[in-house]
Image: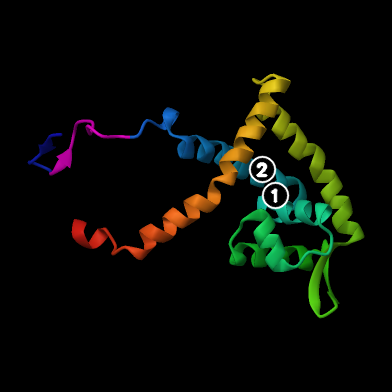
Amino acid sequence: MSIDESDEVMRSRLDHTINRDHYTPALVSLVSNYLLWGGSKVFRHHFGLGTNEWRILSALSNHPGISASEVTAVLEVNKSIASRSTTVLLERNLIRILIEGGARRMYLTAQGVEVHNAMVPIALERERVLQSGLTEDEVGQLQSLLLRVIDGAPGLKLLDEEYLAEPSLTTSLD
């Protein structure tokens, strides 16, 4: 590694780097970015909703009557994101919250079902295009592998907690 002292910038490649094409988190993030950014643009254009609202509509289509905390768990999203998206869906009369047995339960309204059903073909077509370079068997393998990777998420959360319990590295780097 060589630092050009005239402007104190590093002008050559570092010896220890991560190759994006062989680093699973980068690859998963790239796919996620394609899905989220493109999906949000398309869904906002056609329905005035982003991918976070779509994900909640989809979750409620599969799990009618779940609570807000259950939505965050099913979707693995931050509570504030789920809350903002839920507010949008409530304001658009696409979902309704009912108090049942002391719990606040969320349901799609008739209009929510209609919007959900209009969004499904677009979501499925985007998935089809994304997977177009794969055979049917490879799609099944990919989904199976991704589910196994997701099974490792609790271990990743534990590792993150360990790192967060340590003193910040930025203080030693300043």
> In percent of the image, x 73 and y 22: which residue is there?
136
Disc 1 marks a residue whose amino acid type is Arg
Residue 93 visible to the viewer:
no
Q: Nearer the viewer, mark 1 or mark 2?
A: 2
Residue that numbered label 2 is attached to = 39
Is residue 12 found inside the magenta-colored segment of the image?
yes
List x then y, in percent, for residue 4.
11, 37
- The single residue placed furthest to the right in the displayed view is 110
Direction from residue 125 to residue 27 in the image, left or right: left
The quadrant the N terminus occupies is top left
Q: Quadrant of residue 88?
A: bottom right
> In percent of the image, x 72 and y 46: which residue is there?
43
- The single residue placed furthest to the left in the displayed view is 5
Number of disc labels: 2
Q: Which residues are magenta?
A: 8-17
Direction from residue 11 to residue 61 in the image, left or right: right
Foreground: 154 or 37?
154
Direction from residue 172 to residue 57 in the image, left or right: right
List x then y, in percent, for residue 32.
57, 41
- The single residue placed furthest to the bottom in the displayed view is 102
List x then y, in percent, for residue 110.
92, 58
